[in-house]
Amino acid sequence: MTTALKRFLRAPKVIIGEIVGITFAGALGASLPNLHIFQSVWFVALTLLTAASLVIVVAEQFRRALSQWRQPPAVASFQSAPFKTEFERPATTAIPQQKIWSERRLGLAGSLVFHVGLLCLIAAGALRALFATDATVDLLEGETLAPTAAAWSAQWPGLFAKTFQLDQPVTFESIKGSSYASGDLRELSAKLSAGTIGVNQQLHVNGSKIYLASEFGPAALLEWNGSQRVAAMLSAQGRGNFAAESAGPDGLTAFVHSNSTRPESVEVRVMRGGGLLFAGQLAVGQTLTLPGGASLALRGTPMWGRLHGSRDSALWLAYLGMILTMLGATMIFTLIKLDCCIVITPLGATERVFIALKPQRFAPLFQERFEKLVREQSAKNEAGICNKEVGCRAANPSSILHPLSSSPARTASWLLLAGSLAFAAGCDRVSPTQAKQLVERYNQVVSEAYRRGDVRLIDPVVGVNEGKKLTGLIGVRSDMGITLDSKMQSLEITRVEQAKNSLRVHTKERWCYRDLKIGTGAQVGQASQDAYEMTYIFTNISQTWLVDEIKFAAPPQVGRTNTPWVADRAILHGTTKPEARP
């Protein structure tokens, strides 16, 4: 490898860029697993570049650690030691004495082991991106997975990898799961013809691995118009609820809901465009006749589960890298090489004693160790000690200056502490962009709840007060046989105010409203173009911002003059009085 290439790969800017790139790829891959970042070409290039830099770093650290291990420290090197003192005492020997030793030399290998672990992890990532294959499939109880690549619904092979398939058929016999009251998964297991498997556990099938994912639920076997059959996989929505959306013929859409894992009937809402055609319970075996001559039947509600298939020959290398990385980090912080020096120089009736302690890092941790060493040597003097640097203070080891007692170091430590507190204080601040995202999410969810007439959709975005208000309003509309179709045309965040657990977001908004008849989707009454100045009051509940109240900051500008049911935002939120500005 040429000197120029080594210099490039070892350059701080290049290494920082690699760290940022790997961090970004890891965060993106964890938050958006469907993108399958770790099989992309750019990730392979990034891991190969990072591996090349790590090879150079590991080689340099190996040579440095080997040199330091073999070569004992010289007396001259202790002149820069953070702990040192010199004093005279009555002579105990006529021969000059010098004792230099090192403790915990194994700590020299800490950084080397850590970087070797990182190299193994990066190499495993590169090998996975090149040769590993991932696949996934959703199976109903009783369904058999054929030993072909086409049996898997999706595959993500590496650049040089083959598609994933099993060597034998596997039947998904049954699945059993339960959740806590909060909706979090408590336990999940599936029985396959090849064996029983728990969530995130692996099952070996002739060299391939199958994993049971945490996604599961009931499936609604729907039949449209007596011929088109669809399996709607209901996914967990929290609090024991499951829901799915299934597209049918002629623009029909069915929204299916269940609060049981093995239901005998499900709640169905059928829509065409923005109009609600039906809302109610549909039992297994029952057929529903829809306006316009369409029909929908529920043929069964078996359970479904998701399986992941994987073939990754570099997995052992990744595990080795994790072990070495953790071991290296432990060695860095617990095995700290310590060089000690005691030099005794005879001066006739007295002798000069020089004591020094030089830790490899974290010097303040060794204050007591140095004081103990000084006390051991001071005990040999019965007449007292005269310190040539700091008078007689060396006779009292506790008076030795702490390495951080100097003004620059003390100032730096206070600045570090202040910076850390400032950073911690700013980490939870909500930016205007984040505030806009919170308002947009709330309005999207609530608009969809009004459109479907389904109040359960609002649970993830509202607090208790706003939830009670919306529950009544949506329920009254459904009783009147109409739904509200609303669309936000513009949103501007004018001000954000934040306290410890509360957040006020002031906005300017423009909306379009229209009422639709349930069953036909026909428009009822006038459409309306409205403009508002709003204040959203959020509360922080379990690390989640929920809308607890909405107020007007100015009188609303409402377009339409009469409606079969008041749909403008002024009445929806129970007030037409603008909020007093602070």
Image (cartoon, helix red, strand yellow):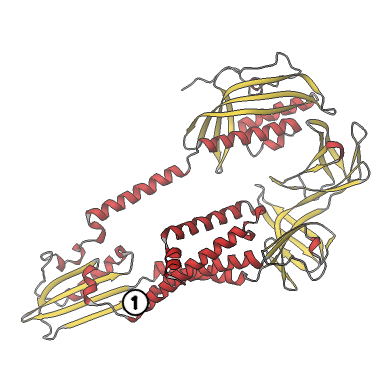
Question: Which corner quadrant of the image does residue 194 belong to?
Answer: bottom right
**Up/down of 307 relative to 414, above or below:** below
Q: Position of residue 326 (x, y in %)?
A: 49, 67
Q: Which residue is situated farthest in the top direction here?
A: 561
Identity of the amino acid at label 1? Gln
Closer to us: 33 or 265: 33
Q: Position of residue 490 (x, y in %)?
A: 61, 28
Q: Is residue 507 left or right of residue 197?
A: left
- Crowding around mark 1 (Cα neighbors within 10 Å: few <14, some 14 to 19, many 20+) is few
| Residue occupying image coordinates x 55% and y 43% | 543
Q: Is residue 424 left or right of residue 170?
A: left
**Up/down of 100 relative to 204, above or below:** below
Q: Secondary structure at mark 1?
A: helix
For disc 1, the marked residue is: 68
Circle count: 1
Question: Which corner quadrant of the image does residue 127 belong to?
Answer: bottom right
| Residue occupying image coordinates x 14% and y 64% | 393
Q: Position of residue 243 (x, y in %)?
A: 75, 44
Q: Position of residue 290 (x, y in %)?
A: 89, 34
Question: Which corner quadrant of the image does residue 133 belong to?
Answer: bottom right
| Residue occupying image coordinates x 87% and y 40% | 249
Q: Is residue 326 visible?
A: no
Q: Is residue 398 visible?
A: yes
**Up/down of 353 relative to 431, above or below:** below
Q: Which residue is situated farthest in the bottom direction here?
A: 95
**Up/down of 115 relative to 476, above or below:** below
Closer to us: 464 or 24: 24
Q: Is residue 68 left or right of residue 242?
A: left
